[in-house]
Amino acid sequence: MSKNFHYAYAIVASCIAITCLPCALVLSCAGIFFTPVSEFFGVARAQFTLYFSILNIAMMLTLPVAGRIMSKVDLRIVLSACVVLCGAGLIGMSRGNSMPWFYVMGAILGVGVAPLIYLSVPTLINAWCVQKVGFFVGLCMAFTGIGGVIFNPIGTSLIQSGPEGWRTAYLVFGIIVLVGTLPFTLLVVRTSPKDKGLAPYGALSEGADSTTATVDVAGIPAAIAMKTPAFLALCIFCGVITLNQTIYQFLASYASSFEATLPAVAAASGIVASAAMAGQAIGKVLLGTINDRSVRLGIFFGLGCGVAGVLLMWFVPSSLALLLVGAFLFGVVYAMTTVQTPLLVRSVFGSADYTNIYSRISMVGSLMSAVAAVFWSFVIDSPGGFPLMFFGGLVCMGICLVTGLYALAHKAV
């Protein structure tokens, strides 16, 4: 490697391809298909979107197995297989003619995307970098949102191209996943710097020999970590921050609820959702950078932004500008789900058995994803309505503050 280029940059590029293509196309773009597909088959929207709940359950069941496999098998094989499952699942969705078919494809997509969205980025970045770990994790994870911004309009145009345009959109998305990601997972990805005769990025002092430099990897085994109070605290953190994140899905509905009293706010419902998405993308990079300085500061920053965002949206919705600021700030706490959580796990338990530990903690978040939208729907439909939802969000963030700080105070390394 030259002084100006380390192979870790190629690994970062591979991670960006993974988050921007399969992760974004399977997860961030799912919503554009809910209405057109359910209307095409003449079924209730909930009947079709059940596939997404199955997808999340499949993710939860896959994670512990994937964690064990990824700690033992060449990541090129594992990640390429996951990409193939995602591409095949999307192409399979384009051929769907019955709800059970979509449910099977949802399970396939869940198995494929789980290691990609939860494990691939932190595992590769942890292995390849000892400096700027938070920044690189945040940068890569930001592309789940950026991918949504890029491909949602493209998918919508394809869907609107004809009565069965949704089939074309699924097919194109599947091909993009395979053609755009497999070259990286097959040809660029390497499990560790040793595979290239290198030391991790940032591990070498000036003039050191990259082929002989070694890096001590601190950490404890998953079997020991799972018996600690810190592990339970991080499981709670992961589940509750995921529950809080799901409030994002209802921000457009919240803005629309002012149609009779504040029509200008209601008309901007789509912009409110976009503001939150922008906050998520920028927030991931900011959180990663802050965590490189202090994981504790990252917790306070992310949750502080979230609390401020909720209060602005709740108490001053009449000001569209402040509502958009609130949505943007809430996007920052949304970013904590995929940035703060893995960095917390690394800080508390180290990198030695990171993949196995994080895969088990991620199960809680994946399980919560399967039920969170239904939970908040019940809350919104209750007499408390949207104010109760926002109060619930504040409670969630309070729980995350306590559990995150507790885990750091009882770190094992």
Image (cartoon, rainbow, N blue to C red):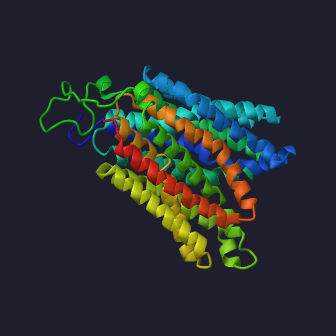
> Quarter of the image holding residue 128?
top left
Q: Is residue 207 left or right of residue 180?
A: left
In the rendered image, the vertical position of residue 65 relative to residue 314, given as above or below? above
Q: Nearer the viewer, residue 366 or 6?
A: 366
What residue is shown at x 61% (from left), y 36% (from top)?
Answer: 175
In the rendered image, the vertical position of residue 112 relative to residue 40, given as above or below? above
Q: Position of residue 389 (x, y in %)?
A: 64, 61
Q: Is residue 299 left or right of residue 206?
A: right
Q: Is residue 98 left or right of residue 364?
A: right
What residue is shown at x 60% (from left), y 48% (from top)?
Answer: 28
> Quarter of the image holding residue 9?
top left
Q: Position of residue 155 (x, y in %)?
A: 66, 49
Tally of marks: 0
What residue is shown at x 49% (from left), y 67% (from top)?
Answer: 308
Q: Nearer the viewer, residue 115 or 246?
A: 246
Q: Position of residue 318 (x, y in %)?
A: 62, 79
Among all residues in the image, which is located at the extreme left? 207
Residue 163 appearing in the image: no
Among all residues in the image, which is located at the extreme right? 42
Among all residues in the image, which is located at the extreme top? 72
Quadrant where the C terminus sits is top left
Quadrant where the N terminus sits is top left
Residue 281 appearing in the image: yes
Q: Nearer the viewer, residue 6 or 345?
A: 345
Q: Position of residue 172 (x, y in %)?
A: 65, 40
